[in-house]
Amino acid sequence: MVPGLLSLPAMVARAHAATILGVEARLVTVEADVGMGLPCLTVVGQASGAVSETRERVRAALAHSGHAVPPRRQVVNLAPADLRKDDAGLDLAVAVALLSAHGIVPEARAAEAFFWGELALDGRLRPAAGTLVAADHARGSGFATFVTAPGAAAEAALVTGLDVREAETLADVVAFLRGETDLPTAHPAKDGDATADLPDLGDVRGLRLPRLALEVMVAGGHNLLFVGPPGVGKTMLARRAVSLYPPLDDAAAMEVTKIHGVALGRTASSLVRRVPFRAPHHTVSPAGLLGGGTPPRPGEVSLAHRGILFLDELLEYSRACLEGMREPLEEGVVAVVRARYSLRFPARFQLLAAMNPCPCGYDGHPLRACTCSRQAVDRYRARLSGPLVDRIDLIVPVHPPADGRTMAAPAGDDSATVRERVVRARTMQAARLGPHRIRCNAQVPAEGRLLAEVCRTTPQARRLLDRIVESRHMSLRAAGRLLRVARTVADLRGPDDPWAPIEEVHVAEAAQLRRAVAVRPEGPRGPAATADASSAATRRRVASTSAF
């Protein structure tokens, strides 16, 4: 025991930080008590994960910071005590609270700022995951000053109304709190070009109907499924969808940047303006796709929030993954429930999927014979449940040209041209749906008064819609989904009037963009007979779609 310390009274000091739960932050008050007893440093308050090692990092950082603390009994409490904490960003607040308890930094200055950063053993500060979430919570909790590492300061500065200071070392933080020096103020970087270096839709030749489906999907926020044999361009089309979106607005960009910072541990210097495009492999687990784990982290559906979730080879995904997407597709959130708490991850994504028509992939191909039995085809397609299909507005076959001359097909509009039409359509949707706090046509309920209000039709269009619903035996919800697609087609093709009625041609095009998954043709099972039947069926389908 150091001489002279027996007469010193016990002292409690406080600093503030946060812990990340899902994509939200919770305020953590770090309380440090220095009293009599055997020299030790104890951290309590459900410290787990990275926080369970905070004691050793803080001990070493204090030793190298130039501010040695006397050997006393030191207890650090992370309040509230019933909340699990496992964020390395708590290191800096723990060190500041201890220094304040020892009288090295003023107690008031330590309590009025918000601290976020991981400590290296030599006292340097490192960025911690979730900086933007922590900074936004600090502002919402009434803090004016946010102190963090240089690598994360620009990200924290994305939160307006917050004075963000960057410190290289713990010693710099101590000097700042004691008023001996000032810390530099951080500023966010300039946003980059959201459409730069993206593959262009102009590279795709032919495929007129699938190209239209992609445009309608982006313009109206609909979900899309491509069905076709291998090599016809399904994946090539899907990877060009991002180039059709305008940059994310401020609110959406803030949401996306927060999620990516927490889930991927990325440090952003500017808001993410490019629409997310996530393409997980079909071996992904349900927790990896939907979110979960210990501690719970956002999954791929949340990483695709405000963007696209592309599932190639859709029927190769596990049934748990496919059926688990039904609620997020409808509600836009994923609820993860645990014994002590429940979390809600944002998941307002668009599903873009691609699948083969059969196990071998060549059912309906004009030049290659299908080798699958009917039983194999039925089992394969049974993996796609009716409730999931019901949540997909656009189901479009993708066929190769009957003569096999893909490169001879005419080139369509490039991404910039299509994007202009998309922006125009979205502007009309914003004017029409803004008062209802809805962003796009796909979010309009498939039944009810709002659907009738925003999807008014001409008499001719209504009669055609009734005939289609009757001939296809469509439910009321399916009919509403068809009407929503027709509304998007009208926004793309109609006049610059958000309240212009849906016309007959718009309903006809919407019907072409919503098809049942094709059933393989009847006939003999020999290769030649299969090829002939498939070719004939393909020619009939191509001829029927060319009229639109």
Image (cartoon, rainbow, N blue to C red):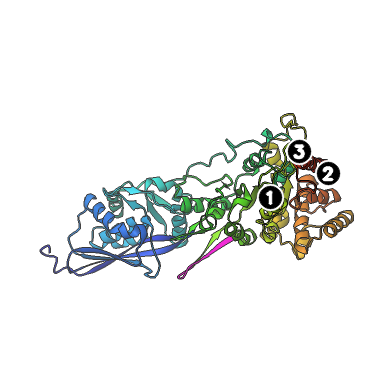
Q: What span is in magenta?
A: 333-341
Crowding at mark 2 (Cα within 10 Å: few <14, some 14-19, many 20+): few
User: Which residue position holds label 1?
Assistant: 224
Would you say 84 lies left or right of 76 here? right
Residue at image position (41%, 51%) is 164
Of all residues shown, which one is farthest toward the top?
A: 408
Label annotation for residue 95:
none
First-in-chain label (1 vs 3): 1
* Label 1 element class: strand
The residue type indicated by label 1 comes to Leu
Label annotation for residue 366:
3
Residue 334 within the magenta-colored segment of the rendering = yes
Q: Position of residue 55 (x, y in %)?
A: 28, 59
Residue 529 sits in quarter? top right
User: Which residue position holds label 2?
Assistant: 544
The residue type indicated by label 2 comes to Ser
Residue toward you, 188 or 321 = 321
Residue toward you, 282 or 214 = 282
* Label 2 element class: helix
